[in-house]
Amino acid sequence: MPTVYAALRDRLLVCTSADRRPNVWTTVTRLEGHTLECIAASPARPERVFVGTFEGGLFRSQTGGDSFERLETGFVSDAVLSLTISPHDPDVLYAGTEPSRVYRSTDGGDTWTQLTGLTDLPSADEWSFPPRPHTHHVRWLEVDPFDPERLYVGIEAGAFVLSTDGGETWQGRPAGSRRDNHTLATHAGREGRVYTAAGDGYAVSDDGAKTWSRPQDGLAHTYCWGLAVDPADPDAVIVSSASGARSAHTAETAESYVYRRTGEVPWERLDDHGLPTGDGVVRAVFETTDEDGVVYALNNRGLFVTDDFGDEWGRVGIDWDEELERQTPRGIVVLPS
């Protein structure tokens, strides 16, 4: 059974199965009181987990979540909003901050180098995050699974940005790209395929993010956040979405949904499939594994899993009390034991 790291707004839940029994879980809390923003870990180094916070910088565990240390990074601020680990080398990772900067480590987080030039892009003067309009941040980072030098960056809000040379130079706002990118994804089985779930809708590219299409048919809620792609099928996509930020992120006013698209057919809303949606449910975040059809979903009602890419979801039996129903998840990592 896997280990699940559930990053909530003010704590990290580390969930492991007890005695390898699938319905018996042990949950411990880490980093309580910090304002969590993102989490990353690699199956190639499962003992090492990174968590970015808004006010406390970057934390690393080298003990599978048993303990964490705060890293001295030299970032422009302590607001670390995005992290990703290269699929080509688990010692190579990237971090994004507020204000928007991108940093790279090649030694597992011990030292960091800023990839300069991001804010020299022509569109940078238009980047702005509505709750803090004087600034903006790097919401998502993704390394291309076919090219370790190709990096995709989502700026909240203002631009999709890519680099083809490891961050030496940047290209912003390619044709058809979204402006308010929240979650990006690629697929190990389809070279050139890039996906985005954005506040201004869903989009997909088949040429390494040079150009984009925007299939929206059936997607009635277009403020998209979470995103998952079936490892077995690059044309099978799940997103979480709402009508706007207020109904996506705040439990008291939440009303979010989950949609699925397979091939060229319209989006299908996954109501009544075992995953809570609708009134009172915040937008979900998702995680896939190397198993075909398997997706984990985390929202304010708990942790859920499907093994048939959304036809039927079941609740994972981790501890989930009433207080957690007011939380908004920031990220999820699922690693093999």
Image: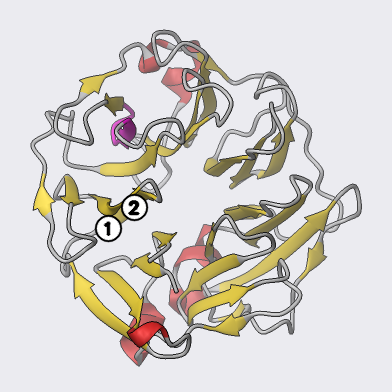
The magenta span reads 92-101
Q: Position of residue 307 (x, y in %)?
A: 66, 71
> Is 321 or 3 nearer to us in this picture?
3
Occupied quadrant, residue 120: top left
Occupied quadrant, residue 94: top left
Q: Quadrant of the N terminus?
A: bottom left
Amino acid type, callout 2: Ile
Q: Position of residue 263 (x, y in %)?
A: 87, 49
Note whether residue 233 is visible: yes
Mark 2: secondary structure: strand
Q: Quadrant of the C terminus?
A: bottom left
Amino acid type, callout 1: Leu
**Placement of 25 over or under 111, stated as above or below:** below
Please tell me which residue is depicted at 54% across the width and 21% down the height of the picture: 147
Residue matched to label 2: 39
Q: Position of residue 115 (x, y in %)?
A: 31, 17
Mark 2 vs mark 1, CA separation in Å:
8 Å
Do tag 2 and tag 1 residues touch (Cβ < 8 Å)? yes
**Placement of 316 over or under 200, stated as above or below:** below
Of the two numbered discs 2 and 1 in the rendering, the one whose residue sits closer to the viewer: 2
Membership of 93 in magenta stretch: yes
Please tell me which residue is depicted at 23% across the width and 59% down the height of the picture: 35
Would residue 184 be found to the left or right of residue 319 on screen? right
Please tell me which residue is depicted at 65% across the width and 79% down the height of the picture: 313
Residue matched to label 1: 36
